[in-house]
Image (spheres, rainbow, N blue to C red):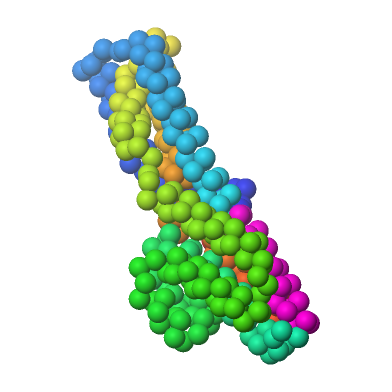
């Protein structure tokens, strides 16, 4: 996620370098041909205006849809943070109650709380790696037992496996009276919500925006870049300032190209890019909060570096 207010224009130009090169080439070519009297044909500016209006509609729709996808992804991860806190609070409160009532020993209660909460933290990390398609499971190895981590590595859907284990362990705790007979009524909806959040992430990851919008937006942008200087040269020539067709074409095309690029970047919020939802930082928040609830040392808080938060 980008947190800085100012951008490096060199990187902006690099990201739209193809559009800039085509724009400058076309504008210089039209100016040179018109000045040398090789080509004195000029199109009415209304043609560029109509094309620009159609292009703006396509770009606006794509940007709106892209931001909606990004914001939905951010909302999902906000829900994962909140539900993780609720889940940890329920586990701690219910197990402490069983220990206070003498149904289980304090040692067994503390071990069970740590196991369940560490596995919940591991779920958040595994989901982050799952949607980013990263094979770095060792990042949460310290949160699982050696046997369980070995099993998790063999699963094609690691976060779903960890939720499955959470459900089984809740049932086992109920059998041992570590959890009450009715505690599952409040815990199961929380586990179901984690499955819903995971499904939402997978839907965004695996379902891109319709490719026809991407294709035709790009096509209309290049058509507009080709037509624009030919539509401008006539007016500038009548004012004896033909050379202005180059900077004016560049500025107008630059605006449209940047707007189109913004939509492309926000379209996929789980690609481990600077514009992504900051899932690494959000997993760090989950781990810090849940470790604090357990009374254990917290990892260092992740902060933005050079204006980027991952």
**Between 207 and 136, which is closer to the camera in this rendering?**
207
Q: Quadrant of residue 30?
A: top left
In the image, the segment drawn in magenta is 78-101
Q: Position of residue 5 (x, y in %)?
A: 62, 48
Q: Position of residue 183 (x, y in %)?
A: 66, 67
The residue depicted at 46 percent of the width and 67 percent of the height is: 159
**Between 260 and 92, which is closer to the camera in this rendering?**
92
Q: Is residue 215 magenta?
A: no
For the stretch drawn in magenta, what is the main secondary structure?
helix
* Quarter of the image where the C terminus is located: bottom right
The residue depicted at 37 percent of the width and 50 percent of the height is: 206
* Quarter of the image where the N terminus is located: bottom right
Q: Quadrant of residue 302?
A: bottom right
**Between 230 and 138, which is closer to the camera in this rendering?**
138
- Residue at the limit of the structure toward the left, as seen here: 38
- Residue at the limit of the structure toward the right, as seen here: 100
Q: Is residue 99 magenta?
A: yes
Answer whether residue 291 is visible to the viewer in this image.
no
The residue depicted at 25 percent of the width and 22 percent of the height is: 33
**Tally of marks:** 0
Above or below — where is 93 with respect to 220?
below
The residue depicted at 52 percent of the width and 40 percent of the height is: 68
Q: Position of residue 62 (x, y in %)?
A: 44, 34
Q: Position of residue 66 (x, y in %)?
A: 47, 40
Locate residue 220 relative to residue 184 in the image: left or right. Answer: left
Answer whether residue 78 is visible to the viewer in this image.
yes
């Amino acid at each position: 996620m980008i947190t800085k207010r100012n951008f490096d224009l060199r990187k902006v130009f690099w990201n739209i370098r193809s559009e800039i090169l085509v724009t400058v080439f076309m504008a210089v070519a039209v100016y040179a041909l018109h000045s040398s009297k090789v080509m004195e044909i000029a199109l009415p500016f209304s043609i560029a205006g109509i094309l620009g209006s159609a292009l703006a509609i396509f770009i606006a729709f794509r940007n709106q849809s892209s931001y909606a996808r990004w914001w939905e992804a951010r909302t999902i991860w906000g829900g994962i943070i909140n539900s993780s806190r609720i889940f940890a609070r329920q586990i701690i409160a219910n197990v402490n109650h069983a220990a206070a009532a003498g149904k289980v020993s304090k040692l067994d209660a503390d071990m069970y709380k740590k196991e369940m909460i560490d596995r919940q933290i591991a779920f958040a990390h595994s989901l982050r790696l799952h949607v980013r398609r990263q094979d770095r499971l060792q990042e949460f190895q310290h949160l699982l037992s050696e046997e369980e981590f070995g099993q998790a590595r063999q699963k094609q859907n690691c976060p779903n496996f960890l939720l499955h284990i959470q459900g089984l362990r809740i049932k086992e705790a109920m059998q041992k009276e570590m959890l009450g007979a009715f505690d599952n009524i409040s815990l199961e909806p929380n586990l179901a919500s984690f499955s819903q959040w995971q499904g939402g992430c997978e839907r965004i990851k695996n379902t891109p925006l319709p490719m026809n919008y991407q294709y035709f937006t790009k096509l209309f942008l290049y058509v507009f870049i080709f037509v624009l200087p030919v539509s401008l040269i006539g007016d500038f020539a009548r004012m004896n300032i033909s050379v202005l067709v180059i900077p004016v074409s560049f500025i107008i095309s630059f605006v449209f190209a940047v707007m189109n690029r913004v939509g492309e970047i926000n379209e996929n919020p789980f690609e481990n890019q600077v514009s992504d939802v900051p899932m690494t930082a959000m997993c760090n928040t989950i781990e810090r909060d849940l470790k604090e609830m357990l009374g254990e040392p917290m990892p260092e808080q992740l902060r933005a570096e050079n204006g980027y938060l991952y």
